[in-house]
C-alpha cells in the first residue's frame, strides 16, 4: 500500500494528464485495506485527469479474478474480464459513499449484508452501525473530504470479517495537532482513540468518537482496530486491561485516514433487539 502511494508522482497537481501505469502481474492477494486505499488513489488520479493504464492483467490468476468479481475492472476499464463475473456472497464490493448518504447506505445496504454474514438480525447491529457512522463522521471532521471508500470481506476459514473505510484528506494527526501541537503522528492516533477525547470545540458537535469504536469492536467483541494516517499506524487489540494500543511510525505516509475493523465471527456479541425492531 505505502509502496504504491509513494511511487505515485508527486508532481501530479502540476501535470494534469500525466501517464501512470499500474502493473498487476505481481499481485497474488488483495487485502481489504489495500483495495480500499487503491480505490482512493485511483479516484484521486481520475480527479486530476491522469492518464491511467493497467498491464499484466490475467483473469486466470485468482487474485485478478477476485478483483473482477468485485467489479473493479468494470469500474475502471468499462467491462469485466469475464462475462460471468459477479460479487461473491462473502464480499461487499468497494463503494464510494458520501457522508450525507451514509446513514441510509448503512441501514439499507451494508448492515443487511453484515447481518447475513454474522447470522444475526439487522437489529442486533445497532452498535456496529454507530461505529461505522462515527468513521464517516471522522471523514467529515478530520479529512476535509466528504466521501469515504468502503470495502468488506468475510473470511469464513479465518472466522473474521474485515471492514475497511478510507479517505484521502488531511488525516487525523493534522486535526489533533491543532489542539495538541506537541504530539507525533503515532501519539496523535492514540489520543484520538481515548474515551472522551474530541477535536470538536462544542459539545453539540461531538459524537461517540473513536473511543466508542475501540470499546465496541475491541473490548466488547474481542476484535481489532487498525488506523493508518499520516506517518502513524495504530493497532488496538484486546488485552486483560481492555484495549492494548500499539502505535508506531508506519512504513510510509498515508495521505488521509484508513481504518480497518476486524470482527471475530465466533466472538461477536449481538446487541439486544429494541422494541422497534419487532414493529412492522
Image: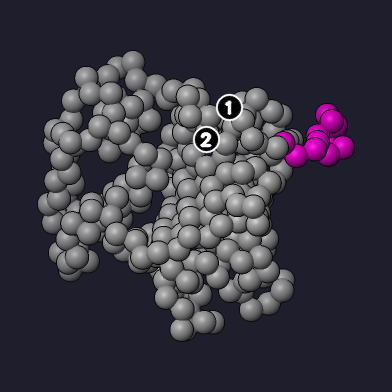
Q: Which residues are magenta?
A: 270-280
Tell me what residue is drawn at x 85 percent, y 32 percent.
Answer: 279
Regarding mark 2 in the picture, which secondary structure is present there?
A: strand
Q: Which of these two is toward me, 5 or 112?
A: 5
Residue 48 percent location from the top left of the image: 25, 58
Residue holding disc 1: 117
- Residue 38 - label: none
Residue holding disc 2: 161
Q: Is residue 32 magenta?
A: no
Distance, label 2 to label 1, CA atoms, is 8 Å
Mark 2 touches mark 1? (CB < 8 Å) = yes
What secondary structure do most residues of the magenta stretch adopt? loop
Residue 83 percent location from the top left of the image: 30, 17
Tell me what residue is drawn at x 68 percent, y 61 percent.
Answer: 208
Tell me what residue is drawn at x 64 percent, y 52 percent.
Answer: 240
Describe residue 148's horizontal placement relative to residue 60 as left or right. right
Residue 122's image quarter?
A: top right
Amino acid at each position: 500500500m505505502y509502496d504504491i502511494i509513494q511511487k505515485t508522482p508527486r508532481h501530479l497537481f502540476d501535470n494534469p494528464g500525466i501517464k501512470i501505469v499500474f502493473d498487476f502481474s505481481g499481485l497474488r492477494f488483495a487485502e481489504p485495506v489495500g483495495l480500499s486505499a487503491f480505490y482512493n488513489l485511483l479516484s484521486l488520479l481520475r480527479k486530476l485527469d491522469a492518464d491511467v493504464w493497467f498491464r499484466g492483467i490475467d483473469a486466470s490468476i485468482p487474485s485478478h479474478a477476485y478483483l473482477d468479481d468485485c467489479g473493479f475492472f468494470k469500474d475502471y476499464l468499462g467491462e469485466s474480464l469475464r462475462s460471468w463475473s459477479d460479487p461473491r456472497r462473502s464480499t461487499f464490493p468497494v463503494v464510494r459513499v458520501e457522508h450525507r448518504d451514509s446513514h441510509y447506505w448503512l441501514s439499507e445496504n451494508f448492515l443487511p449484508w453484515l447481518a447475513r454474514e454474522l447470522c444475526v438480525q439487522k437489529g442486533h447491529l445497532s452498535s456496529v452501525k454507530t461505529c461505522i457512522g462515527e468513521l464517516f463522521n471522522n471523514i467529515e471532521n478530520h479529512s476535509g473530504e466528504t466521501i469515504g471508500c468502503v470495502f468488506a470481506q468475510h473470511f469464513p476459514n479465518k472466522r473474521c470479517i474485515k471492514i475497511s473505510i478510507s479517505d484521502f484528506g488531511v488525516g487525523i494527526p493534522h486535526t489533533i495537532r491543532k489542539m495538541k501541537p506537541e504530539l507525533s503522528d503515532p501519539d496523535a492516533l492514540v489520543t484520538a482513540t481515548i474515551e472522551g477525547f474530541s477535536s470538536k470545540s462544542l459539545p453539540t458537535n461531538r459524537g461517540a468518537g473513536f473511543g466508542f469504536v475501540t470499546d465496541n469492536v475491541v473490548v466488547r467483541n474481542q476484535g481489532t482496530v487498525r488506523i493508518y494516517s499520516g506517518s502513524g499506524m495504530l493497532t488496538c487489540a484486546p488485552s486483560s486491561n481492555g484495549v492494548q494500543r500499539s502505535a508506531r511510525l508506519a512504513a510510509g505516509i498515508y495521505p488521509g485516514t484508513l481504518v480497518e475493523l476486524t470482527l471475530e465471527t465466533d466472538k461477536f456479541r449481538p446487541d439486544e433487539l429494541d422494541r422497534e425492531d419487532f414493529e412492522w
